[in-house]
Image (cartoon, rainbow, N blue to C red):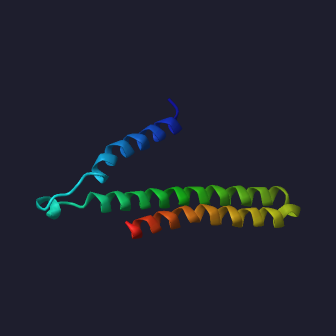
Amino acid sequence: MTRKAVWFLSAVVITLVLAPVTFAQTTETAAKAVDWIDFAAALALGVAAAGCGLGQGKATAAACESTARNPGAAGPIRNAFIIGVALIESLVLYALLIVLIK
């Protein structure tokens, strides 16, 4: 099995394990227990931030490499890079918004 498949299957298993916990109802006596919804929201924000960091790193590396190979196309590459990084960063902003609304 490839490394990518192992990471994907691990993420699916973690999601399936945490899903019932996040939708469980709380009772008056369980109010003093750990708030799993907050934990799941924080975990989701952390995963989104990690994915964003990896995506931005790959985008920056690709933009630098393509600019080094073809300096004449630096302008369009820069524009596409800025738009791409803004879209990648919006993932973390959406996750943060969901955590704050929670």
Residue 75: percent from left, percent from top: 83, 67
- Residue at 88 percent of width and 63 percent of height: 72
- Residue at 49 percent of width and 61 percent of height: 49
> Within the image, what quadrant is residue 44 found in?
bottom left
Q: Furthest residue to the bottom?
A: 100
- Residue at 13 percent of width and 62 percent of height: 28
Residue 26: percent from left, percent from top: 20, 57
- Residue at 73 percent of width and 59 percent of height: 63
Left or right? Give the position of 91 relative to 60.
Answer: left
Q: Nearer the viewer, residue 7 or 40?
A: 40
Q: Nearer the viewer, residue 92 or 28?
A: 28
Q: Furthest residue to the right?
A: 72
Q: Nearer the viewer, residue 92 or 60?
A: 92
Residue 14: percent from left, percent from top: 37, 44
Vertical order, 25 against 7 (above or below): below
Numbered-mark total: 0
Left or right? Give the position of 74 relative to 29.
Answer: right
Left or right? Give the position of 86 relative to 93.
Answer: right
Q: Furthest residue to the top?
A: 1
Q: Nearer the viewer, residue 36 or 58?
A: 36
> Within the image, what quadrant is residue 60 found in?
bottom right
Give the quarter of the figure containing the C terminus: bottom left
Left or right? Give the position of 2 relative to 27.
Answer: right
